[in-house]
Image: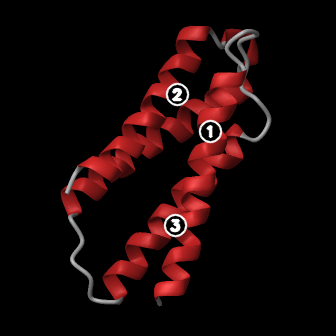
Amino acid sequence: MDILSGIFLVIHMIGWAIVLGGALTSMREPRIAKGVTHGALTALVAGILLVGLAEMSGGDVNNIKIAVKLVVALVITAMAFWGDKNQERVTRGFLGGLAGLTVLNIAVAVLWR
């Protein structure tokens, strides 16, 4: 179970890296880069699977922390989908918000014990 959890954790982090990298590299010409939506979905699904694996193995899961991370991840995913469908309405502020929420989600994961 530990190996499987480790694999999903790597996939989860790669998904967030795609979202953050895509948002930051598109700041000069505001648009949702290809792959940002897929990265957000990958991170979301991998995170849900990580929590499921932790629950199945009898680990101690902080449900409040997970709920906060889930809400932030859902907002990021919704923003990525909306921006992908409405490319002409994406601004630097929108991309900054997307990047900021991604950093917030990573910070919650690392700093909230």
Alpha carbons under labels 3 and 2: distance apart = 20 Å
Q: What mark, if any, has residue 99 been given in the picture?
A: 2
Question: What type is the residue that disc 1 sits on?
Answer: Val
Query: Is disc 3 placed on a helix, strand or loop?
Result: helix
Question: What type is the residue that disc 2 sits on?
Answer: Ala
Q: Decide which of tag 2 and tag 1 comes sooner along the chain.
A: 1
**Residue bearing mark 1:** 19
- Residue 93 vs 51, above or below: the answer is above
Q: Quadrant of residue 71?
A: top left
In the rendered view, does 68 fall on the left or right side of 53? left
In the rendered view, does 22 fall on the left or right side of 2? right
Q: Residue at x 34, y 89 (%)?
A: 57
Across and down, in percent, residue 113 comes to 19, 57
Question: What type is the residue that disc 3 sits on?
Answer: Leu
**Residue bearing mark 3:** 9
Q: Quadrant of residue 17?
A: top right
Alpha carbons under labels 1 and 3: distance apart = 16 Å
Point out the residue furthest to the right here.
Answer: 34
* Other-residue count near label 3 (Cα within 10 Å), few / some / many at <14 / 14–19 / ≥20: some
* Other-residue count near label 2 (Cα within 10 Å), few / some / many at <14 / 14–19 / ≥20: many
Q: Decide which of tag 3 and tag 2 comes sooner along the chain.
A: 3
Decide which of 50, 82 is in the foreground and name it: 50
Across and down, in percent, residue 110 comes to 33, 51
Across and down, in percent, residue 85 comes to 73, 27
